[in-house]
Amino acid sequence: MINLLIKDFRLMFGNKQNVSQQIVSAVFSVLFFVAFIVIEVFLFRTILKTIRDIKYASTAFLTLFLFVTTILITVGNLFQAKRLFFDAKDIEQLSNRPVSNTQIILSKLLYLFLIHYATSLMFEYPLFVAYGTLIGKMPMFYYLCLFYPAATFFFEMGIALLLVYPLWLFTRFMKRRFWLEMTVSLVLICSLTLVYSYVLDIFIKLVANNDMLTLFSQQSINGFIKFQRNAFPVNFLVDIFFNKSTSALFPFLCISLGVFGLGLSVAIFAFGDVRNVSASITVNQKPRPFKDTPIWRALVKKEFSLIAKNSDYIFSYTGLLIAQPLLLHFVIKSINTVLKSGTIQYFASLVPGLIDYVDILMVMLFTVIINQGANSYITMEARTIKNMKTIPVPFSTQLFIKVAIPFVLSTASLLVSCIVLWLTKTVSFKIMLFALLISIVLLFVFQVISLWEELSIRHGKPRSTFVSTLFSYLLPIVYAVTAIVLSYTGLSSSVTILLGLAVIIVIGAAPVAIVFTRANDMFLSLEAIN
Amino acid sequence: MKKKNLLVLLIIPFLISTLTIVSVNVAYNLVDVDISYIEWDYEDVVAYQVSEQLIPLKAVGVNQRHAKVSQGNNLVWKAANKDGTTEPYAAVIRQGDNYFLKAVAEGNVVVTCSNQKGNVSRSFDCIVFKDGYISVRPVIANSRVGKVDDTIYYGEYDFDGSNAKKNASFDIVVECRPTSVLSTMSQELVSFSDTLDVELDWKGATEESGAMRVYGRVNIDVTDWINQSSKANVTVKSSIDTYKPGVMDFEIVRNGYNVYNYQQLLDCTNRSTDGKIAVLQVSFDSEQNYAYYLSTTKHKPQYQNVKCMGDLNGDNKADFALNNNTVVPIKTKYNHLFLEQWNAANPDKKVSLDVLTGLYVQKDFYGNGHTINFHDLTYPSKGGTVLEDGTVSLPELASTDLFRGPKSFYTVGDPSGQGLNLLTIYGQDNSGMYAKGNLTINDVVLQNCDNDGKPLNFLETVGTVLEVDTDLNDDLEADFDAQIAVKNCRLSNGKNIVRSFSSNLLLDNCMLSNAHNFLFFTGSNKYAQVDGNKQQNILSTGGNTTTTLNKFLDEKGAGNRILDDYLSAKYGNDRAFKDSQQMQECLYGLGGKLNSFSIQAALTTNLAGQFKGQTEIKDCIMNTSGIASIALESLFNGPYLFNNKIPNTISKLFDVVENMGMLNSFDCYNIAGTSYPVKVTISGTTKFYDYKMLDAIDLSGLVHEDISTFLSMFGSLTGNNSYNVTIDEIFPIKNLLGRYVAQKGYDGKNTQYSGKVNIPVVFYGGGANYSQIEIDKNADLFNEDMIGLREGTVQTSQVNLLDRYIYLPKVSPIGIVQNLAQADIDKNTLIKTVTIVTGYEPFEFVFVNGTNYYDDYLSKQETNLLEQLKNNLK
């Protein structure tokens, strides 16, 4: 059982990253988590401080926050369960071992419980602490709240298990239909972008425009209080944990255990079903007639299909390219609003052009970070590296096309984004041009460095992305700091931005020169995998 | 990994906004919304029998428009004996969040309910009786919000149907409880002053709420006047001695007219050539509040004590117009040289020299605790409406609104409102009540607009609440034989609350609250104009030179070049001065100390000690201002006001802008000078409940500026967003004040006012300010722990704007303007223009030591109404 549990942890957390990647990854995870918690608690405390005098409003808002957390955690649980129950490799390995279905299911449930508890505790306990300190709760309250995540497990996991099989069937169905998958993914990404913009807009209104009072009218607060009555299961749990209501305990247990029982039945059935059929997807492709195509065209087509037809890339690259103009518009608009609000506007005005520099910085960061989704030029080939090395096409042509496709796609998205920013008057025409120019230069430097890292892969070890990640953050920040310092000395914004660009070129020149001179040797040293 | 990067990126805007807003801590204090009034079901007089039983006290704090009010608005109850004795007749007992009254011993008490801040309160009289009681009171009740002066006043006269005078009379009610007491009373047991005749309708006695009531009438006829007022009383006894007699004491005001409606109010004030003594017997509220009163009152129409302010024809609608005495125009006495020069040069765009007032008072005014609310005259009629979600839209001036903000003292641009004006320095404002003469205003509640907890910047155009004027012969100096005494009043909701220029004023036991700028604003209308022909020694480009200002500040004079270089921050061998320090010496002096050879010194006339007005502020309560409680004003007096054709940079810019049809650049000459000083004495137990976040100080009411609009126009042309500026960048006072607060610990650390500052006094800068604040030696307010004292006066913290402006760097030029004007113009050039208009004298602020002031003083606070009642008994 313990072995099974360890195997599940390896399946979910084991990765092929090297130490530097793991460190960077961990740093980002911690950063994200801390930032999320800071914002969550700040928002929660701010609202609570404003509305706590209104009867029932405090618990209504706590319920609202917990309900949102419940939805997010349930969605998280769903994807965890899908990967845990339906990983093809895992199923294949387990099918050769003398382990019963019951043991497997139990180990997976134990794993899911532990993960659910840890995640819920991380996101929900800060809310309890904030609530308790503001309302003035006794120490017993904080102790009791440790059990809240455990109590939510049955309902939230029950819903996740109920949906896990339909989700698996749906994704399996989509894998065979490229355009459908593409369309659904795009709709999903665009919807999430709009939701993001909506949330961001409310947040900015709340904190930057001092709209707290106007946002929370008696009417809207009454609405939240009404909502509280229907926010199952949180309303029951709040009653049980905060109001010490025993009457809510029985219906809550019945509904939660009922949902969990149903979900578990579906998961057990699905797991058994999937175990008994081949997990591999066989696609009946019709033989295509041979066509004599020019080499460069064939290579472009191949690279394009590698990027566009892989479902992982659709979410981490292709879809984001399409959403980039919207995302950039919302983010930059919000940051501009913040920098032009209240007293911060005075401090911002001490550095002429500060808002412009920050806008350009955001364009640069978004461009390179989205481009990270398509910078595995060699890795994505996997077993076909030997083909690259053996086909009678010059390495320079192959590498050029590999780098050029994402470069062109990212640049196109960047261009559209900049035009959108200009048309919506988020940035001026001049700043749009500068942002475009600097981001293209940065993108080029970044891609060349990524290629260098790809060509340096040896002995089957994973690629080190340390330098490229460093460059993707450090170079834009170096540019912004340079621009701000120069601007403070009284230089005009155009000169400042151009000098910032010069700094990027100087720093990026060395790795670019290295790649151009040593690419041949590095390509030849690449190891083919059989 | 890649997705995590994206997540971090997406969370950045949340993080930036959280961190920036938390770090500058501007959140929500800008809109510090209080309750508007207190709603309850109590009659004006309530009677309770002595008992061990606790009587629940119930009231609700109502906010007319906003759903949520700020901290400090929970209701608290207090009771005080009416006769000032300390052994309580009734005690207020708190149990959790609930309050109860315990009737302890026979006597009369005032029960007051207020919010914790104490700026909104209401009271009722309570009779505590043992076996039974008899009370006598007017049928038309006194003020709904409670009287400060315990005395009830009646005028000698009433207006008859044709607005002629007749001897006054009023209805009274005698109430007794239990009902059996009635049988022990009779006409023979009624006694009254010989100036009165009292008739009671014993046969028509009715039972109401467990008490018997007998209605009657009091007729006043005073034939032998000894004093200005005559004391009178009506006493009704029982044949059984255990029932305490009912007594109604009041004073009859000689030549006073009782005011029961708006027509009569106008007859005593705006319509009267010399004025009549007014004695209010009803309140005058806004149309909206009056409608609410009508829908809730239980009183018959003839006994209602609230009327609509401005209702001329009895249709319950407020009417105000310039041609029917509902509004009185008064020619401004403040410096209006600029407007005169403008009107002479622009006959088609003349600007009126009149300020407006809603009530022009020339004789004594007795309020009896009643309210006059000028809302429908002063408040913008558009906007301010309640939206579906319960929020309120910003108020907006309609074309027909009469109150549109203060007159211009000087405008860079067009003062007529028909074109762009870069900067307007304010002169005199309109007022709700304008009092001129040698008179007393007693126990009246004045407010320029509804008390609906609006943010202070909504008060931008509502005017001053009360303007006083004792300059009787209009020579711009206070007539020292005359004084206006404002006693026992509550004044609130104005751009400034009380304004006294070239006047003698006594503010005694008043509460001033909710001002966009200042609660008390004083200065002098008289000033010494700059002498442009006088030979003076001025520091110039080549050292000191003897010249006249006419020559020095001429287009060909050295001053033109110096100011040009100052605006464009240019120093060096080929410039007026080598460095900014020399420039600062030339403009004003270093470190906030006036260099006697500077341009500012040349523009100044020494008027120290030549006071043209004085004010005593005694036992007052200063509550919530946008900037400071008391402001001592002086004229702005920059070189640009002496000759606005220089410096070249600005005149070229205006030529361009004028050619573009955006702004009328008007040449004026020598319009400012040095204000004569005034003296303010603080005495008694004057208190300052004026804590605010430094960031919440709103300077936008000091001057009107369109520099930000102007810059943003060019910003949008050139696509440079950095041209957006705010008043805080133009007047960086907050930032400079922040240093003092941080260095000297002026904020209310460890108190409920943590992080907030309390600024009792500000001295205007720009031009020289010779006014003084004096502390009475017996004042129970200032000591060195609370406010730094300096030789009998207060210690000030200087805010020298020039220190900040002189180091403003040169920034990106406004290319399009630079090319058109052929002058070196950037954003900071325009910002610095403010100083060449205002002058370079530092502003001076007086702070209280936040923590000590609270611990030693405010922590012992009562509700404010009770504080006033206590002061009244002194």
Image: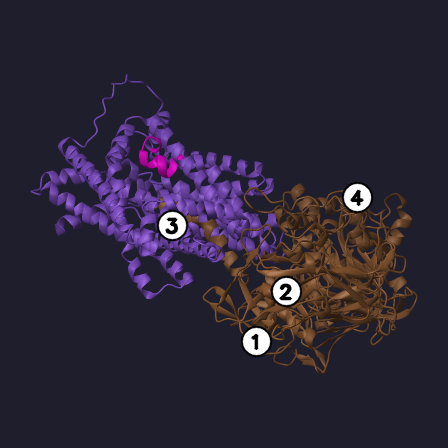
Chain colours: A purple, B brown
Could you confirm whether marks 4 and 2 are on the same chain?
yes
Q: Which residue is mark 2?
A: B182
Q: Nearer the viewer, mark 4 or mark 1?
A: 1
Q: Earlier in the sequence, mark 1 or mark 2?
A: 1
Q: Which residues are magenta?
A: A307-319
Q: Give the residue displayed 44% in from the left and 36% down from the top.
A: A323
For label 2, the SS is helix
The chain holding disc 1 is: B
Q: Which residue is mark 1?
A: B88
Q: Residues within 10 Å of mark 3 (few under 14, many from 20)?
A: many
Q: Which residue is mark 3?
A: A63
**Residue kind at label 1, given as amino acid type:** Pro
* Residue B684, quarter of the rendered image: bottom right
The picture places residue B399, in percent across and down from the top left corner, at: 76, 42
User: What's the magenta bit mostly, secondary-structure-wise?
Assistant: helix
**Residue kind at label 2, given as amino acid type:** Leu
